[in-house]
Image: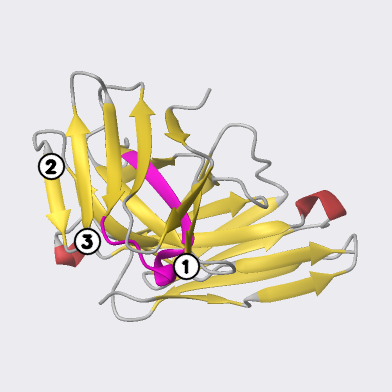
């Protein structure tokens, strides 16, 4: 089945630095990928929709300049948390859909645990 | 505003019992209702899904019951096993302006199946 690889699985960074998270579709092409944020014991909140070759679409309340999204190819989307602060600490998850399969199934990555100290 | 409400927040079931998780939605434009299973430190995995023109879908021990008029749907896990212990999310999706499905998640139910 479709596999989405997310890297790194966890990262600790100092306040004020930037962190890049990669999301790759391993065996399918994904024109659209999605980035979610999940706080402990809470639901997944959609942050933005990443479109290959065009600008990402951000959900209301998500800072575009803080969460930079780049979808440069059909298999790779990146999320960069710029000037990270402790309140950005969270679990970030990407997902993608194998459009060629014709099925609904969005496949999720394993997530990235970001801790800002 | 929470568009998909899920209950209970947590659930403890004895091995072999039936686990039932309920969800309700507001937006009648939702056209797909998936359930996801998430283990700690992992991303969600699609478990089973249903379209609103179907009242029930069964896959193995997992069954979705869908009540369109009441705008409610539920997940039943028969013969629950300790390995089913995870957090379950219901979700509802709608086609976005870009042609893709935009998914809204429920608040999650932490299921613990005890031996």
What residue is rendered at 14% in x and 53% in y? B58
Residue at mark 3: B61
Count of numbered badges drawn on the protein: 3
- What residue is pinned by disc 1? A72
Task: Check whether the beta carbons of the residues at disc 2 and disc 1 lie within 8 A of each other.
Answer: no
Write the residue at 26% across / 56% down: B78
Q: Nearer the viewer, residue A17 or A42?
A: A42
* A79 and A87: which is toward the camera: A87
Residue at 51% from the left image edge and 40% from the top image edge: B107
Residue B56 bears which disc, if any? 2
- The quadrant holding residue A99 is bottom left
- In the image, residue A12 sits, relative to residue B6, either above or below, namely below
Could one spot residue B1 in this view of the protein? yes
Q: Is residue B96 magenta?
A: no
Question: Would you say B17 lies left or right of B88 here?
Answer: left
Chain ID for label 1? Answer: A
Q: Residue B3 — which label?
A: none
In the displayed structure image, the side of residue A12 where residue A99 appears, left or right: left
- x then y, percent, for residue B82: 43, 69
Tell me the element at label 1.
Answer: strand
Disc on the earlier residue, 3 or 2 = 2
Name above or below for residue B5 compared with residue A94.
above
Q: Secondary structure at mark 3?
A: loop
Instruction: Tell me which segment is drawn in magenta.
Output: B78-92
The 10 Å Cα crowd at callout 1, few under 14, some 14 to 19, many 20 or more, is: some
Position of residue A52 relative to residue A62, above or below, is below
């Amino acid at each position: 089945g479709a596999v989405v690889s997310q890297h790194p699985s966890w990262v600790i960074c100092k306040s004020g630095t930037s962190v890049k998270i990669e999301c790759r579709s391993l065996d399918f092409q994904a024109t659209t990928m999605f980035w979610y944020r999940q706080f402990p014991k809470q639901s997944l909140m959609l942050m933005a929709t990443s479109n290959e070759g065009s600008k990402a679409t951000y959900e209301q309340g998500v800072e575009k300049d803080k969460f930079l999204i780049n979808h440069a190819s059909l298999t790779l989307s990146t999320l960069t948390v710029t000037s990270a602060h402790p309140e950005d600490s969270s679990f970030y998850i990407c997902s993608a859909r194998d459009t060629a399969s014709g099925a609904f199934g969005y496949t999720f990555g394993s997530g990235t645990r970001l801790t800002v100290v | 505003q929470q568009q998909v409400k899920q209950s209970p927040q947590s659930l403890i079931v004895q091995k072999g019992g039936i686990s039932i998780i309920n969800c309700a939605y507001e937006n009648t434009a939702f056209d797909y209702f998936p359930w996801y299973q998430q283990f700690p430190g992992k991303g969600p995995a699609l478990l089973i899904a249903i379209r609103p023109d179907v009242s029930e879908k069964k896959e193995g021990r997992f069954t979705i019951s869908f009540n369109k008029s009441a705008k409610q749907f539920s997940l039943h896990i028969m013969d629950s096993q300790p390995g089913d212990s995870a957090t379950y999310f219901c979700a509802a999706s709608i086609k976005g302006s870009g042609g893709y499905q935009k998914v809204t998640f429920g608040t999650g139910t932490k299921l613990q199946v005890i031996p």
